[in-house]
C-alpha cells in the first residue's frame, strides 16, 4: 500500500475555474491532480500554497457530497491571496489538508439549525448548507442569517436566492450600509438585528456562527437572550496559523490549538478561555 501523503507536503492541484464573488472575493474550483477527492467534512480547512508566496488557511466552501472537485472562497487580504487572485483556470496551486475539526454533524442531526454568518464566513457555512441540501432527511429546518458590509459585498447572491426559493431554508440577509437611491431594497443593519424576531426553540435548536471576530460576542449575547445554551452553539474561530497540524503553537488558545482542536469549537468548551472570543 502506498504511504499516506506527508502532512507537511503540499499536493499539486489544478484550478478548474475562477470566478468573481464580490469586488474582494473570488471563488476557486479546484481538483487534486491525482484525481482523488479531498476527503473533507463541512467546517474543515486546507492550507493553500503558491511557490514564492507562502501558505494560508482557507475553509472549504463546498460540500463533500458535490463530487471530486472542491471550492474555496478567497478574500484578497495579503500577499498569498493577492497572488491567488491573479491566477486563472488551468493554473496550479498546492494544498495540504483537509485539517481541523468539522462542524459536529452528530450534534446537528435531527435538530433545527440556525446558521449565522458575517462577511467571508458564508464560505465555510456554504459547505454545510450544501450538505443539508443534499441530505435533507438528516436535519430539521434550517435558518440562514447572513450579514455583509454592503450590497456589493454579498457573496453567493444567486445561491442565497435559490436556497430561499427552494423552501428548504429560511434566509435573512442584511447589510451594514446601503447607498441611498441604489437598487438594494433588503434589510439594513447588523446581522444581530435579525435574531430577536426569530422563532427559536432552545431545546431543539443548534446555532453555528462563522464570521469576523467582532461579530461573535454580539451574536452570542442575542442567542443567550433567546435561552439558547452555550452547549448548543458552535463557533468557527480564525487565528493566524502556520503548520495547520497543532505542532507550531502559532494559533494557540491557552492549551488548545485552533488548527487542530478547532477551528470549530462548542462554545461551552471555550467561552472561559482567555482570548478565545
Ligand atoms: C481556519 C481558517 C479558515 C479561513 N478561511 C478563509 C476563507 O475561507 N477565505 C478567506 O478569504 N480567508 C480565510 N481565512 C483567512 C486567511 O487565512 C487570511 O486572510 C490569510 O492571512 C491570508 O493570507 P495572505 O498571505 O494573503 O495574507 P497575509 O499576508 O497573511 O496578510 C493578511 C492580513 O493579516 C495580517 N497578518 C499577517 N500575519 C499576521 C500575524 N502573524 N499576526 C497579526 N497579523 C498578521 C496582515 O498584516 C494583513 O492585514 C481563514 C483563516 C483561518 C484561520
Image: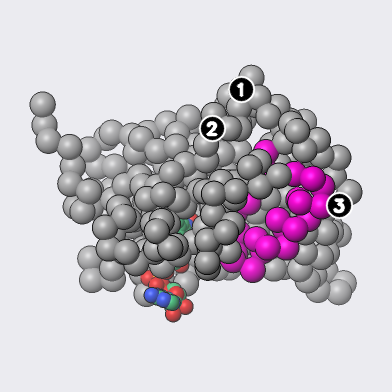
Q: Quadrant of ligand 1?
A: bottom left
Q: Does the stretch in magenta take in 207?
A: yes
Categorize mark 2 by other alpha carbons within 10 Å: few (<14), some (14-19), many (20+).
few
Q: Earlier in the sequence, mark 3 or mark 1?
A: 1
The correct choice, above or below, for 1 with respect to 4 in the image is: above
Per the image, label 2 sits on a secondary structure element best described as helix
Q: Does the stretch in magenta take in 151?
A: no
Give the residue at mark 1: 138
Using the rendered view, name the quadrant where residue 205 is placed: top right
Mark 3–mark 1 distance (CA, rounded to whole Å): 27 Å
Categorize mark 3 by other alpha carbons within 10 Å: few (<14), some (14-19), many (20+).
few
Give the residue at mark 2: 105
Q: Is residue 50 left or right of residue 145?
A: left
Per the image, label 3 sits on a secondary structure element best described as loop
Specify the segment rendered in magenta: 206-228
Categorize mark 1 by other alpha carbons within 10 Å: few (<14), some (14-19), many (20+).
some
Residue extending farthest to the top is 137
Q: Nearer the viewer, residue 272 or 248?
A: 272
Give the residue at mark 3: 196
Amino acid at each position: 500500500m502506498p504511504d499516506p501523503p506527508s502532512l507537511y507536503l503540499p499536493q499539486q492541484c489544478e484550478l478548474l475555474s475562477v470566478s468573481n464573488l464580490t469586488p474582494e472575493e473570488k471563488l476557486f474550483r479546484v481538483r487534486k491532480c491525482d484525481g482523488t477527492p479531498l476527503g473533507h467534512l463541512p467546517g474543515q480547512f486546507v492550507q493553500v500554497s503558491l511557490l514564492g508566496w507562502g501558505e494560508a488557511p482557507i475553509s472549504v466552501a463546498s460540500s463533500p457530497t458535490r463530487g471530486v472537485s472542491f471550492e474555496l472562497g478567497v478574500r484578497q487580504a495579503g500577499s498569498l491571496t493577492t497572488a491567488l487572485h491573479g491566477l486563472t483556470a488551468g493554473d496550479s496551486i498546492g494544498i495540504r489538508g483537509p485539517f481541523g475539526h468539522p462542524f459536529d454533524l452528530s450534534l446537528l442531526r435531527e435538530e433545527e439549525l440556525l446558521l449565522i454568518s458575517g462577511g467571508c464566513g458564508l464560505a465555510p457555512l456554504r459547505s454545510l448548507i450544501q450538505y443539508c441540501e443534499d441530505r435533507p432527511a438528516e436535519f430539521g429546518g434550517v435558518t440562514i442569517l447572513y450579514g455583509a458590509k454592503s450590497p456589493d459585498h454579498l457573496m453567493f447572491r444567486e445561491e442565497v436566492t435559490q436556497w430561499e426559493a427552494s423552501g428548504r431554508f429560511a434566509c435573512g440577509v442584511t447589510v451594514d450600509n446601503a447607498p441611498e437611491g441604489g437598487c438594494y431594497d433588503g434589510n439594513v443593519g447588523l446581522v444581530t438585528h435579525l435574531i430577536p424576531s426569530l422563532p427559536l426553540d432552545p431545546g431543539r435548536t443548534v446555532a453555528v456562527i462563522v464570521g469576523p471576530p467582532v461579530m461573535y460576542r454580539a451574536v452570542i449575547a442575542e442567542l443567550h437572550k433567546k435561552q439558547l445554551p452555550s452547549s448548543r452553539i458552535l463557533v468557527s474561530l480564525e487565528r493566524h496559523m502556520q503548520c495547520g497540524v497543532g505542532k507550531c503553537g502559532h494559533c494557540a488558545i491557552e492549551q488548545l490549538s485552533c488548527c487542530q482542536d478547532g477551528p470549530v469549537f462548542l462554545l461551552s468548551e471555550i467561552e472561559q478561555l482567555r482570548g478565545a472570543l
